[in-house]
């Protein structure tokens, strides 16, 4: 079975075309090397799939005949992803929400001034580094 079809059938990707694009972009690795979407996969292979800033480490146990239900995914795949990866994802989520809540609208005038000051300071540092 093809890698992209397998990842779609065990519900790591919503569509087959998204799984194909992930393979082409190098987000799917088999034994530390990038794989093409058409690469054949067999039971016992280990894959690393980068999705939502998490590296999912999965082992292929069996090949499904077609797309399976969410409850049956564990028959075909064993997940070896470390728990630290999910904890980092939670920390990223909280770090983004500390300042502005989602849906609060456009930045305020003070926010825009702070952003402009930050860009000006970055440009000044860059120019200073080029002159020395």
Image: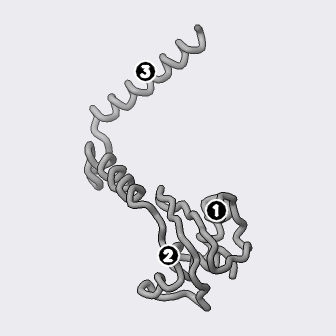
Q: Which residue is mark 3?
A: 121
Q: Quadrant of residue 43?
A: bottom right
Asked if labels 3 and 2 touch by Cβ distance under 8 angstroms, the answer is no
Q: Upstream in the sequence, badge 2 or badge 3?
A: 2
User: Dot 2 lies on which element?
Assistant: strand
Residue at (51, 59) in percent of width and height: 55
When the figure is inspected, residue 60 is found, relative to residue 94, above or below; the finding is below
Left or right: residue 20 compared with residue 49: right
At 46% from the left and 64% from the top, the residue drawn is 81
Q: Which residue is mark 1?
A: 29
Separation of residues labelled 2 and 1 (CA atoms): 16 Å
Identify the image quadrant of the C terminus: top right
* First along the sequence among labels 2 and 1: 1
x, y percent for residue 124: 48, 17
Residue of label 2: 78
Q: Say whether disc 1 or disc 3 marks the residue closer to the N-terminus.
A: 1
């Amino acid at each position: 079975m093809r890698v992209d079809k397998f990842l779609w059938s065990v519900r790591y990707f919503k569509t087959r075309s998204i799984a194909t694009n992930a393979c082409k972009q190098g987000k799917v690795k088999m034994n530390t090397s990038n794989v093409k979407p058409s690469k054949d996969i067999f039971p016992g292979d280990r894959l690393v799939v980068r999705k939502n800033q998490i590296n999912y480490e999965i082992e292929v146990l069996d090949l499904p005949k077609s797309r399976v239900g969410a409850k049956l995914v564990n028959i075909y795949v064993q997940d070896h992803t470390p728990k630290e990866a999910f904890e980092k994802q939670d920390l990223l989520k909280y770090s983004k929400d500390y300042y502005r809540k989602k849906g609060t609208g456009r930045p305020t005038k003070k926010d825009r001034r702070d952003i402009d000051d930050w860009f000006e300071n970055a440009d000044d540092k860059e120019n200073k580094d080029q002159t020395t």
